[in-house]
Image (cartoon, grey):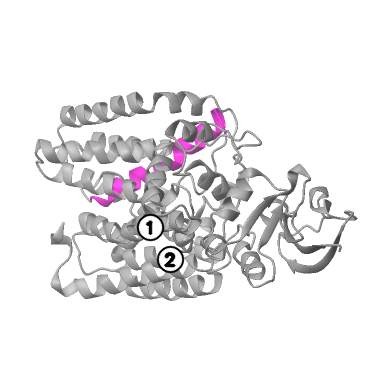
Amino acid sequence: MLKFFTKSNLLILISIFALSTLLRFYYFYHLDSWFDEWNMIYTVDPNITNEETWKRFFGDRGDHILPEYYPPINAFILKYFLKFTGYFIENARIYSLIFGCLSTFLVHILYTSIAGNKKNYLAVFLFSINLFLIWQSNEIRPHAFVVFFSLLSIILFIHLINKKPNIFFITIYIGISLLMLSSWPFTLTIFFGKTLYIFIHRNIKKIPLFKFFLIFFTILCFYIFFNYDYLVYHLQRDSHYTILKLSFFTNFHFRSFFGSIFMGAIFLILFAFMFLKYIKKNLHDEDNSNILFYIIVSSYFLTILYSIFKAGVISPKYLIFVLPLIIVWISHKIKYLKFNKLITFLLVFFGVLNTSYFFFKNPIDRPPFKKAINIISKSDSLNVATVDSTVFINALKSYKAFKKNKLVSIDLRSGKIIEKKFWLLCKNNPRFEVGNQIRPTEEKCKIMDNKKGYKESKNIKIEDFILKQFIKNE
């Protein structure tokens, strides 16, 4: 692997990697959690048994049922990561950040594998500043994990078709591919793209079909064996939250992938132009970048088919693993264009502007837990009462600042109050649920209104929450 990093390019690559890491951690320090992450952090509690983890994975939320639909492997790996690092939301986010940052190196290795040019840094730079990948590297979800192992699987596959690897290397490839598939079922589309490439290029590249059939068959058998229960469980779903709409065909996720309509349009136009201009080269030439093209097209094609005939899965997160491939493919194909240096400059220039302007404009608005905890920590009462769900309460208690400042959680759902002074923190019409709509205060947040024996002493305006302090009458 060291052959991909030479003395002449190592300093530049380290600088880009540092930029990638800096951007992701800068976003990390300003980020709060939201509903999906509350459920994830509840599931991966390292202080419970594996049996209890399975119950939570299949929907037990303490006071309601809401099953998870992502594969369980990432949840259990994260659980044991938190067992050694500490059960905090921040540590769970660092787990995702590790895979998000390491993927930067894999993008450079992938580009070098298909182009052979170790001194072209466009792909790795565009990957580093890509807003969607920065955002998703901070999600307590399996997305960064999926991207990492998808890239690694494709890199090893390119090595397989270009070299004569030994049985040890083949075993590594099978293991990495199993990890990839077991982390996200939609990565099966990657194997469909690989299979297309093998059949179309078998003569040009002199690819031994039987060997690859045996490798792919082995991977598929092991995948079904280890994930049978999950696959049966998952395939029973006849609906998802993202249905196929005609508007999808106007942007193909590029608007989400590149952080804005403007940047999405630039990359979509470039992708379409270079596909049509070099259509024969894209489909038949020996160029290794065709592997990426087949995977990209296969992933979109199969996702659309599944959405039409089974259930809608039109979410950019479901196909996040194709985003680095799009970036690498475009970066490679640009060199064939007449004005490639100008286009490269414009992509870098507008990419930096786009990232700078939209950096904190994540489409999912998150309740400001950190702000609320900070306000309470500086007050004369550290008691925090809430009427929200068990998952919400667990998320609140999982913040480092909550434990560091020795805040005390009180479950008001029982209706019993013994504290003389406390804060009411109530989730009220959060923006990730209602958007910018202005709605009346939720009934559950009125639990202390006109409560005998208590008076309201403070009322602090804060997004997504009701935050009030109450004092017991003497």
How far across and down, in percent of the image, does residue 278 sit?
A: 33, 54
Q: Residue at x 26, y 41 (%)?
A: 176
Residue identifier under label 2: 24
Q: Amino acid at mark 1?
A: Gly
Q: Residue at x 41, y 50 (%)?
A: 82
Q: Is residue 360 above or below residue 305?
A: below
Question: Considering depth in this image, is 108 or 103 the residue closer to the camera?
Answer: 103
Q: Is residue 307 above or below residue 460?
A: above
Residue identifier under label 1: 100
Q: Is residue 305 magenta?
A: yes
Q: Amino acid at mark 2?
A: Arg
Secondary element type, mark 2: helix
Say whether residue 209 is left or right of residue 305.
Answer: left
Residue stretch in magenta: 288-311
- Residue 184, by quadrant, is top left
Q: Is residue 420 magenta?
A: no
Residue 358: assigned label: none
Say whether residue 33 is left or right of residue 271.
Answer: right
Q: Main secondary structure of the magenta part?
A: helix
Q: Earlier in the sequence, mark 1 or mark 2?
A: 2
How far across and down, in percent of the image, does residue 65 sit?
A: 63, 33
